[in-house]
Image: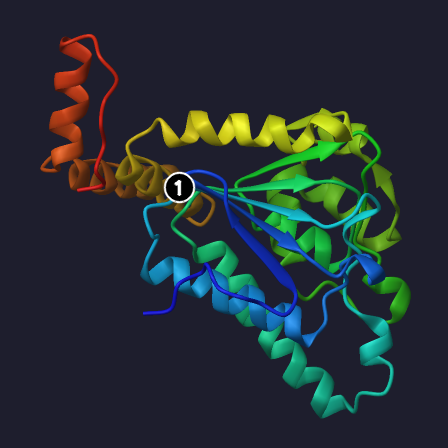
Amino acid sequence: MTSIFRQYETLLVERISEQTAVVTLNRPEVRNALNTAMMTDLRDLFQATYVNTEGLRAIVLTGAGDKAFCAGGDLKQRNTMSDAEWQQQHAVLEQAILALMATPLPLIAAVNGDCMGGGLEVALCCDFIYAADAARFALPEGKLGIMPGGAGTQNLPRAVGERRARELIMTGRIFDAQKGYDWRLVNEVVPRNVLLATVLGVCKEVAALGPLSAMQIKKSITASSAMDLASGYGFEIAAYNRLVPTQDRLEGVAAFNEKRRPDFKGN
């Protein structure tokens, strides 16, 4: 079974605590642009979390350097690609996006700088987005004669509403972190020098939940966007009932009554 804690060509993976890991997009010389290797690394890492969470309860995704979270696709690499090569590379990105969205672990983006194109699509796969005050965002693919292909036309409307998403995607307009917050794309805007510390603090709060609870909560909220209210509630109840026979449920109730912190084991 492959561990996520291994060497990657384009990612740095660090276990900050027993329960939290930080994954850093690590191509700062090109503003952490997505090349084939990074797409492959992201796919492999997040597919591995689906198989084995390795005791983690939250993952932070951020970018190396102080300029960009991710500038989008690496257009220098793509410049000489044939149509077939372009589509083959994009298939890897599609797998990475699906793996990001399918990870059972709470995933938090710490957007430290520019977050453009595929970079914004990667961030949109996360459960929360915290942004540095100087961060900027855009989905400018239409200006290149293409369109978002990393679920941007699906996830941005779910975040900011359909009309706002139409405007942003059809203009390719760049907007700042405060606008992102105002439009409900971003959960919180903080100074860059406290961004990671802020997000790691949120991770501690997330990690305080029962790990099985967090996973079922994530599944239920994700399912809600594709269901009517009654069907979504049915999914929620099914997820709830999966937690009733767990040892974590017994431990949580016992800890409450004994006025102590619960010791969740994930079973």
Residue 182, given in percent of the width and then of the height, sits at 74, 26
Evaluate whether residue 228 shows in this view: no
Residue visible at 58% across and 67% down? 8
**Residue that carries the numbered disc 1 in the rendered image:** 218
SS under mark 1: helix
Say above or below: 4 vs 206.
below
Foreground of the two, 265 or 128: 265
Say above or below: 113 vs 9.
above
Evaluate whether residue 173 shows in this view: yes
Q: In the drawing, does residue 118 fall left or right of residue 47?
A: right
Residue visible at 16% across and 29% down? 249
Give the quadrant of residue 215: top left
Quadrant (top left/top right/bottom left/bottom right) for the C terminus: top left
Amino acid beneath label 1: Lys
Q: Dot 1: few (<14), some (14–19), or many (≥20) neighbours within 10 Å?
A: some
Residue visible at 61% across and 26% down? 198
Q: In the drawing, does residue 17 fall left or right of residue 232?
A: right
Residue 171, given in percent of the width and then of the height, sits at 88, 52
